[in-house]
Image (cartoon, coloured by chain):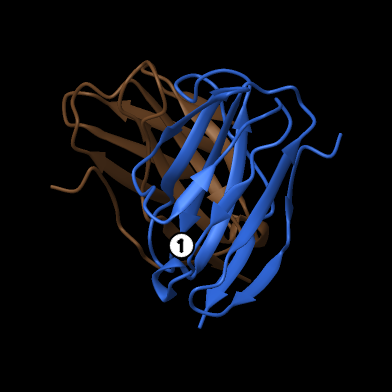
Chain colours: A blue, B brown
Amino acid sequence: NAGVTQTPKFRILKIGQSMTLQCTQDMNHNYMYWYRQDPGMGLKLIYYSVGAGITDKGEVPNGYNVSRSTTEDFPLRLELAAPSQTSVYFCASSPVSSYNSPLHFGNGTRLTVT
Amino acid sequence: RKEVEQDPGPFNVPEGATVAFNCTYSNSASQSFFWYRQDCRKEPKLLMSVYSSGNEDGRFTAQLNRASQYISLLIRDSKLSDSATYLCVVNMKQAGTALIFGKGTTLSVSS
């Protein structure tokens, strides 16, 4: 199994540009998440989804959008990139709520906005 | 008080040493607790869950103290391959997704 796959691995954006970070999982997990990790900081939840068609905001949703049209895919959209969005982005999934189920993370996307 | 606090380290220890990390959490209603390991420039991976009675997995022992609101991770007989950042993760409630990640404690094991 591939697990959680994120693309691209690296990206440089100019201020104001848009992009979509792709995330797909092949474990048939219901829950999917997007986190960002800034240097020396803990992971912060951006958005999450408890199943296809259902998404909800996390701790730091501003500047981002998500959709969940299928169980497998959970893309993250940046509409107007800002330097504050320079970070490492991790997608994760779990079969049930993270309360009692570990998260399976993708390899991450390193995004730089200049 | 921050939601989840860890000593950032770094902890520099020789091979074979025993090292312990502590993590404190602010919400007394927190329900579940985990230690994740993150290698440099890699994704976090679950190391172990932390149970109320304490639990052990090989050289790793996790303890939970609800009264004092802290969890600990003990690593015995440290290996070079244990060098990584250890993330304390606390779930604040039973429903939904309320995982709070600590900033991590960095361990460097040298020969």
- Residue A73 is left or right of residue B66, and the answer is right
- Going 58% across and 69% down the picture, which residue do you hit? A111
- Could you tell me which chain the residue with mark 1 belongs to? B
- Residue occupying the far bottom of the picture: A114
Quarter residue B4 falls in = top left
Image x and y of residue A96, in percent: 57, 17
Quarter residue B45 falls in = top right
- Residue occupying the far left of the picture: B1
- SS type, badge 1: strand
- Going 49% across and 78% down the picture, which residue do you hit? A15
- Going 48% across and 24% down the picture, which residue do you hit? B55
- Residue occupying the far right of the picture: A1
- Going 32% across and 46% down the picture, which residue do you hit? B22
Q: Name the amino acid, label 1.
A: Thr
Few, some or many residues within 10 Å of mark 1 (<14, 14–19, 20+): many
Q: Which of A84 and B36 is in front in this view?
A: A84
- How many labels sit on residues? 1
- In this picture, is B68 found above or below A22? above
Q: Evaluate whether residue A86 shows in this view.
A: yes
Image x and y of residue A65, in percent: 50, 46
- Residue B4 is left or right of residue A82, and the answer is left
Residue ID for mark 1 = B106
Image x and y of residue B38, in percent: 57, 54
